Image (cartoon, rainbow, N blue to C red):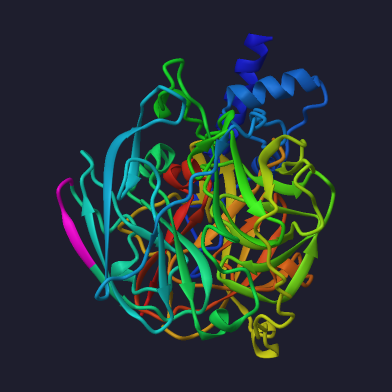
Amino acid sequence: MKSKLLVTTLLVSSVFIGGCSASNSESDENGTMDHSNMTEEDMSNMESMDHSNMTEEDMKEMDMENGHASHTNLVALNDSTGENELALPPLVEPENGVVNITAQQGTTEIFEGVQTNTFGYNGSFLGPVIRMTEGETVTFRTKNELTEPTTFHWHGVDIPGEADGGPHQLLEPGGTEDVKFTVSQGASTLWFHPHPEGATAEQVYKGLAGFIYIEDNRSKNLDLPKEYGINDFPLVFQDREFTQEKQFDYQAVRNDDGTIGNTLLINGTLNPKLTIGKEKVRLRLLNGANARNYTLKLNTGDKFQQIATDGGFLNQPIEMSEITLAPGERAEIIVDFSKYNSENEIALVNEDDIRLLPFSIDKQKSNSIEISESLNDYVVTDEERNLPVTKKLELFGMGKMVYINGQQFDMNRIDFTQKQGETEIWEIYNKPDMMGGMIHPFHIHGTQFKVVSIDGKEPPANLQGWKDTISIESGQTVKLAVKFNHKGIYMFHCHVLEHEENGMMGQVEVI
């Protein structure tokens, strides 16, 4: 089998190299791939391969040999024992308009009695929740105390390109930089993480990630759970793999198609549980993983309400039985625990019913909040629906051979330009590969976009809100209404961090 597998793997590689090098040669003004130099046979080989003589076992082994994460047969996560109370990040607000944020390294007791080497912001592991208000002028006073370069990327923040924290804004060890801007967007749950070229995945893996909350006048007056750590909780889901010594060894487990681990950490807590009241509780969900998608539901089968997407509130609460988040995506949900008793075993589980976060109900806490029925006034206008497509992007490939419009990232190349304040329609197609393809979470820096359509149809109700990252399945085409409020250079890329580092990233310059 090994020899047959090697031949097939080499054939797969040659098809990718041939197909993509041909498409590198020419592109139109929108960066759309031109296959005019490819023969019909080349196209046929690139589009599909006949695996009819291969067994399912052969296919799976080939998948592993290529490092191609199909994300349909993932390494299973551990079942949370619920023995550790969930850690809550400290809440930080601007003091005299300034927030100090330091990237540093240290050790953290993730496993009892063991110190694991980790990275963090303002601490040894992960980062704080930074809470700001729309209209406020804020200075992020950043400092790099790591022994390697990093950046500070404000994921989802409407911010000038020079302050966005992409790979252009590298901060060397010992360096400091002030990032000053005015908060110009509405209430939302955002996050921040590093974005240095070639090192993003490992730095996030080791612990560099934190939340950003933006509040506005509307959110402050809505009837919602909003007491931090009482009935309003941030939850960042990350899967990791540890050595026998309970350390991170990213380079040993790195997968070019997305690094997946067998150990779940929520807010950096192993085997977590969350103690809540017999009341309505707001959970702010962030998929902070390198590559794993999370499908979240209640083990009871009961429904919850989704109230927000990446960039702000939905127009009204949407009843959901489960929600799937790709890397980089966020959502806010309301779970009503008032109908349960402390004896009930309630937990967030995944699609395999693995217990991710058990809840412990404290009868002493209760509220009688009636969730506001009108949350926002988001709309995709007729004008936006009727705009022509002006930018086409094709996501394609696997492992180290991942491409946008047949090209890999080049920091010296601008792929698109767009005028400040003008809305354009971006059409993104996730082209299947011979292994069937995989989901690509597509992220654009420096803006919140509107999902106009998915495969020509209106998006589901829970995606009808502001987004900065969208999960695009293999074979899907999405249209996005994109507007930048600031000038500068911004990244767009797959948020599977290893795909981003392998070249599935481009640049748009806003002029």
Depth check, front residue: 170 or 377 = 377
Image spot of residue 185 (x, y percent): 47, 79
Q: Which residues are magenta?
A: 173-178
Q: Residue furthest bottom?
A: 383
Is residue 326 placed above or below 455 in the rendered structure?
above
Magenta stretch: residue 134 in it?
no
What's the residue at 41%, 27% (across, down)?
248
Is 41 left, or right, of 469 in this rendering? right
Count numbered badges in the picture. Answer: 0
Is residue 423 placed above or below 262 in the rendered structure?
below
Depth check, front residue: 205 or 479 = 205
Depth check, front residue: 177 or 296 = 296
Image spot of residue 249 (x, y percent): 40, 25
Image spot of residue 408 (x, y percent): 44, 49
In terms of image quadrants, where is residue 376?
Answer: bottom right
Depth check, front residue: 383 or 78 = 78
Is residue 200 placed above or below 370 in the rendered structure?
above
Q: Is residue 261 visible?
A: yes
Q: Residue furthest front?
A: 364
What's the residue at 58%, 57% (across, down)?
329
Q: Is residue 54 visible?
A: no
Image spot of residue 121 (x, y percent): 33, 49
* Rendered-image quadrant of the C terminus: bottom left
Is 226 left, or right, of 352 in this rendering? left
Is 426 left, or right, of 352 in this rendering? left
What's the residue at 20%, 38% (across, down)?
147
What's the residue at 58%, 43% (across, down)?
397
* Rendered-image quadrant of the N terminus: top right
In terms of image quadrants, where is residue 15?
Answer: top right
Q: Residue furthest left?
A: 174
